Image: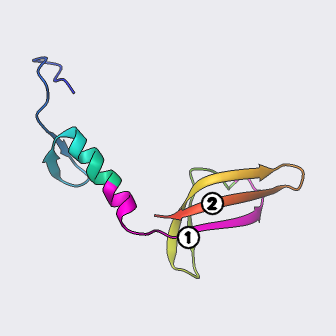
Amino acid sequence: MIETDSQTPLESIYNATTMETAKPEEHYINQYYLSYSRPKLIMETDLHDSPSISIHSILHSKVLNRNFFVQSIDRDLKESTVHIKLKEV
């Protein structure tokens, strides 16, 4: 990464999410490591298709008391169903 004013390489950047200052590569590696370092629950299910089901949805399981994001959606237009793969947030 290059600083636009002085055209010099950036030594570090501030990550407001983690409130840390580090090299861009370190931020990327740390986020990647945190995402995959602990096991997360992956759930697959079939549902009736509706307009409310999208790739941007965050779904809550009352039984498991956990939030999930949609990792993939396969739509069956003939049967009007969707096969959803969910991963724990």
The residue lying at 10 percent from left, 34 percent from top is 11
In the picture, measured across the screen, residue 16 lies left or right of residue 54, that is left
- Specify few, some or many for label 2: CA neighbours under 10 Å numbering under 14, 14-19, or 20 or more: some
Q: Position of residue 12 (x, y in %)?
A: 13, 38
Kindly identify which residue carries mark 2.
85
Vertical comparison of 12 with 38: above or below: above
Numbered label tally: 2
Q: Coloring scheme of the render?
A: rainbow
SS under mark 2: strand
**Residue, x 15% and y 45% (percent of image)?**
22
Choose mark 1 or mark 2, whichever is in front.
2
Check disc 1 and report its element: helix, strand or loop. strand
Q: Is residue 60 magenta?
A: no
- Residue 67, percent across and down? 50, 69
Left or right of 46 in this view: 79: right
Residue bearing mark 1: 60
Q: Does the magenta segment cover residue 45?
A: yes
Q: CA distance from mark 1 to mark 2?
A: 14 Å
Residue name at image x 57 percent, y 79 percent = 62
User: Any mark on residue 81, and which?
Assistant: none
User: Which contiguous range is marked in magenta?
Assistant: 33-51
Badge 1 crowding class, 10 Å Cα cut-off, few under 14, some 14 to 19, many 20 or more, is some
Q: Which residue ends up furthest to the right in the rendered image?
A: 78
The image quadrant where one finds the N terminus is: top left
Q: Nearer the viewer, residue 69 or 44?
A: 44
Mark nearer the N terminus (1 vs 2): 1
Q: Amino acid at mark 1?
A: His
Q: State the image coordinates of residue 15 (x, y, percent, origin top left).
A: 21, 46
Residue 19 screen position, x and y as percent: 18, 53
Whether residue 59 sits left or right of residue 24 in the image: it is right
